[in-house]
Amino acid sequence: MYSKKLFLFDFDGVVVDGMNEYWHSALFALEKFLNSPDIVIDQNLYKQVSNTFIEMRPWVKYGWEMLIIVHEIIKSENPLNSNNKSHFQQKYHQNCQKILLDKHWVSEDLQKCLDKSRKYQIDKDFDNWVNLHKPFYEVIDFIEKIKKEKIKTGIITTKGKVFAEKILEKLNIFPEFIFGYESGTKVEIASRLSNEYEIIGFIEDRKKTLFDIKQNDDTKHIPCYLAEWGYLKKTDKNNLPNEIKLLNLKNLEQLLAI
Ligand SMILES: [Mg+2]
């Protein structure tokens, strides 16, 4: 019999490093599904992830924002680069909204373009697509260990559920729960789950999400861990409140001793 204990994990930057895939899928979405007169897609762009994109990734919350970032990086006039990126980061959310308005784009449509890009690649060559992700094997081992302890696993991600599910299947991981962006915010999901389960931990690499969990009455009791191996901003490790613990891959095992 399984107990009612549940451990929650974010997906991108916690279970897998998908940097290659984000760059690849966002580029392909721009090339195939979004007509923009401001860009020309050179096939060489696919060969290497832009450093500016890597530097911007910690600011990204939803997949559709990656289309905006990649579009900004490859556009011919006044592109986003390492010189002007801090300016963009300072007002990241407002800048994304401004671009949506200027370009007459709708975030839901951009998300659909990204999802179509992923689906197209999966249908065409699944192995090629799935291999763009690098698993964090220490986390995979940890998920297997908690299963032996009869603790359930839940993955909550801001990508589409179906995509996380396919990657996890390939890794031979079958969590009891996978929730994608379709299921609401992470706080809402964690709040619903905590009605039925004792949530004994949540590992996430987006500090703001952990703050949101700690500020909500229904979820503030959940032990929160910031994944040091994920996509962190340089300042994320500074001034962490006591209730959010910084976790590295070597310390994962210690969580089982709690
Ligand atoms: Mg993440």
Image: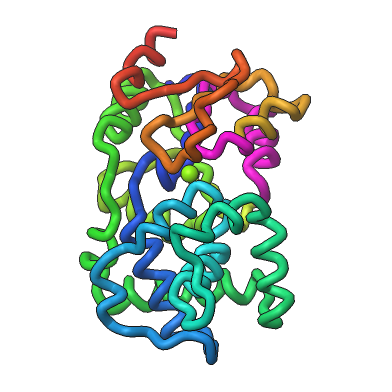
Q: Residue at x 60, y 13 (%)?
A: 242
**Along the line of sight, the residue nearer the viewer: 216 or 3:** 216
Q: Assess whether residue 3 is covered by the magenta stretch.
A: no
What count of labels does the image hold? 0
Work out which residue is located at the far right of the displayed protein and give it.
Answer: 217
Task: Give the left or right position of residue 182, taking residue 69 as reference.
Answer: right
Task: Give the left or right position of residue 172, taking residue 34 as reference.
Answer: left
Q: Identify the magenta region.
A: 184-209
Quarter of the image holding residue 109?
A: bottom right
Point out residue 7 in the picture as x, y percentages from the top left corner: 48, 27
Work out which residue is located at the far top of the displayed protein and give it.
Answer: 257
Point out residue 232 in the picture as x, y percentages from the top left corner: 47, 39
Quarter of the image holding residue 106?
A: bottom right
Q: Is residue 114 visible?
A: no
**Compared to 73, does 56 lie above or below?**
above
Point out residue 45 in the picture as x, y percentages from the top left corner: 31, 75
**Compared to 66, does 30 lie above or below?**
below
Could you tell me which quadrant the C terminus lies in?
A: top left
Q: Is residue 140 visible?
A: yes
Q: Residue at x 51, y 23 (%)?
A: 201
Point out residue 49 in the picture as x, y percentages from the top left corner: 32, 63
**Along the line of sight, the residue nearer the viewer: 2 or 103:** 103
Q: Residue at x 67, y 54 (%)?
A: 91
Could you tell me which quadrant the N terminus lies in?
A: top left
Q: Residue at x 34, y 18 (%)?
A: 251
**Along the line of sight, the residue nearer the viewer: 4 or 238:** 238
Work out which residue is located at the far front of the displayed protein and give it.
Answer: 83
**Compared to 48, does 215 lie above or below?**
above
